[in-house]
Image (cartoon, rainbow, N blue to C red):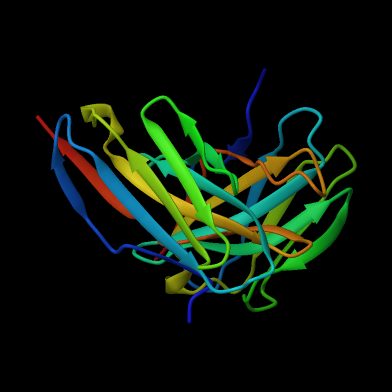
Amino acid sequence: EAGVTQSPTHLIKTRGQQATLRCSPISGHTSVYWYQQALGLGLQFLLWYDEGEERNRGNFPPRFSGRQFPNYSSELNVNALELEDSALYLCASSLGEGYTEAFFGQGTRLTVV
Amino acid sequence: RKEVEQDPGPFNVPEGATVAFNCTYSNSASQSFFWYRQDCRKEPKLLMSVYSSGNEDGRFTAQLNRASQYISLLIRDSKLSDSATYLCVVTIGSNYKLTFGKGTLLTVNP
């Protein structure tokens, strides 16, 4: 069975541009979580989607946004990129609300230059 | 105060050693508790859930003390392959987001 898949693996953007990151959850999982892991800062919660709706949002500015599609895949958009947005962006999926065991994808490493 | 705090580490231990990781959480409404493992430049993977009664999985033992808001992970007979960053994770209330500690790096030396 396929795990959580993320694309692209690596992404290089210049300051001010927009980045779009994609995530496909494990088949049957309806919840998708996004985390940012910047160097030395640990995993910071960004967004949680379940059944197509945004359920929770971390302490990030509005230029971080996303959505979940009817097939439960998800997209994270980062507008007006700043140098400090450079990080590993991890997506995780779970069976849905009430199921806390989450499985992570391998991440997208975003570099802003 | 951070929601989840862990030993800063890093820990360097010889093969065969016993090593313990500690974690505290600030929100008494925390409901679920986990230890994840993250290898260098890889994604985090669930190591084990932590229950109030304590639980053991081979060389790994996890314990939870709700009164002290404290979680621990004990690794016995350390192997080289145990080298990784260990992440303490909690969920808070009905909010199912996983809140991570910063992690503790373990290096097991031959």
Locate residue B78, reporting x and y percent. 24, 32
Left or right relative to A55: residue A109: left
* Left-right relation of B36 to A51: left
Q: Would residue A7 be visible to someone looking at this image?
A: yes
Judge whether A81 appears above or below A25 on screen.
below
Left or right of residue B13: residue A66: right
Residue B58: x, y in percent? 41, 24
Rendering quarter of residue B82: top left
- The residue depicted at 70 percent of the width and 46 percent of the height is A100
Between A84 and B52, the residue placed more toward the observer is B52
Q: Quadrant of residue B109?
A: top left
Image height of B70 relative to A95, above or below: below
B71 sits to left or right of B8: right
Q: Determine the residue located farthest toward the top in the rendered image.
A: A1
Nearer the observer, B23 or A18:
B23
Residue B33 horizontal/vertical position (percent): 58, 52
Vertical position of residue A111 compared to residue B75: above or below: below
Q: Can residue B40 be seen at all in this image of the molecule?
A: no
Q: Nearer the viewer, residue B21 or A20?
A: B21
The image quarter in which residue A104 lies: top right
The C terminus of chain A lies in quadrant: bottom left
Percent x, y for residue B64?
52, 53
Query: Residue at image x 32%, y 37%?
Result: B75
Q: Residue at x 53, y 66 (%)?
A: B69
